[in-house]
Image (cartoon, rainbow, N blue to C red):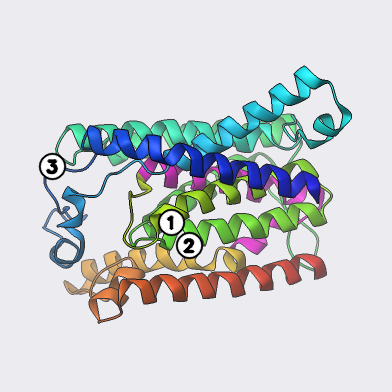
Amino acid sequence: MIKLLLPAVLAFCIGILITPLLTHYLYKFKVWKKNGGKTAIGGHQAEEFNRLKGGNETKTPRMGGIIIWGSVLISVFILYILRTVTQNQFFDDLFFLSRAQTWIPLASLMIGAFIGFLNDFYDVQHDGKGVRLSIRLFLITALSAFMGWWFYAKLGVDSVGLPFIEPLYLGILIIPFFVLLTNALYASGVIDGIDGLSGGVFAIIFSAYGGVAFMQSQYDLAAFCVMVTGSTLAFLWFNIPPARFWMTETGSMALTLTLAAVVMMTDDLVGGHGVALLPVIGFLLVVTVLSNIIQILYRKLTGKKFFRIAPLHHHFEVIGWPSYKVTMRYWVISMICAVIGLVLAALI
């Protein structure tokens, strides 16, 4: 328990400490869009979104996600220094970075953070035109294909766990399966749209998967997940309304790519069911993606919108829910789903 709690507390404290410095530079260099609003997928103006959020985009800094991955990176470095310099058994036991459990998730976090940072940087510098979606999807697909190959060739993962029955054997198809999983989770990053919403949801999800990893005796992975939770809570401390900054791609891409790795690490690799638990623990991420898919397909088929605006959390805002009510209810639902997921993880 100490191995889980201390890294999480350390990441939270580091996040709180570095936020004033980050805030200073985000405001000093005006790291926000110069013109608010966005264009919908069909090429037309997203009128409902621009009415809701367009004004805030020109005065709220982006790149707040730096707090999340920056806190994790600094915390890992501090633990490594303490372990190396002191050569104390306590710090040796506390250090959780291991090839078997945490190299892949940590690499996913940092690579996702870097790609997302580039997108945010170009978004700010080029009037809302970040790295093209096609390029981002290509990079994510290439990264996830390599990681899928690593799971298959290096770790021997060739199946996906299914509850109460034998695992589903995929063989080399585990690679495209992981690519689809990663891209689907990346698509769920659009849940970052209301102050405090994504931070709370992701913190709960990573806490739940930390619990799943703990049940599987993957203590290094559990410590990593809880550390991500701690750093996300530090971000959330400053992101609750009114938000000091937004997470944007450097945070959401880092978290979604990392979550994909964690899901696979808690699946058939250790006889678990990480993938099967995702629709439960990550229910709101699934709902967010599905609402976008439904909106797009319905509009193509009928020429009309199914929701007033997609993704779903913005629809609730448009029909009159205050943003804080949407956020709090999403947190409640996410906590319920996390508890159900942990119960299922203990049973299946």
- In which quadrant of the rendered view does residue 72 lie? top right
**Dot 1 alpha-carbon crowd within 10 angstroms: few under 14, some 14 to 19, many 20 or more:** many
Marks 2,1: beta carbons within 8 A:
yes
**In the image, residue 61 lies at what x, y percent?**
27, 44
| 186 is higher (above) or lower (below) than 118 | below
- Disc 1 target residue: 188
- The quarter in which the C terminus is drawn is bottom right
**In the image, residue 122 lies at what x, y percent?**
24, 32
| Nearer-the-camera pick, 200 or 37 | 200
Question: What is the secondary structure assignment of the residue under circle 3?
Answer: loop
- In which quadrant of the rendered view does residue 227 lie? top right
| 210 is higher (above) or lower (below) than 71 | below
Q: Which residues are magenta?
A: 249-278
Query: How many angstroms separate mark 2 from mark 1 (CA)?
Result: 5 Å
Q: Name the residue type under label 3.
A: Lys
In terms of sequence position, does the residue under pointer 1 or pointer 3 come before the other?
3
Question: What is the secondary structure assignment of the residue under circle 2?
Answer: helix
Give the numbered dot on residue 164.
Answer: none
- Disc 3 target residue: 34
In terms of sequence position, does the residue under pointer 3 or pointer 2 come before the other?
3
**In the image, residue 322 lies at what x, y percent?**
30, 76
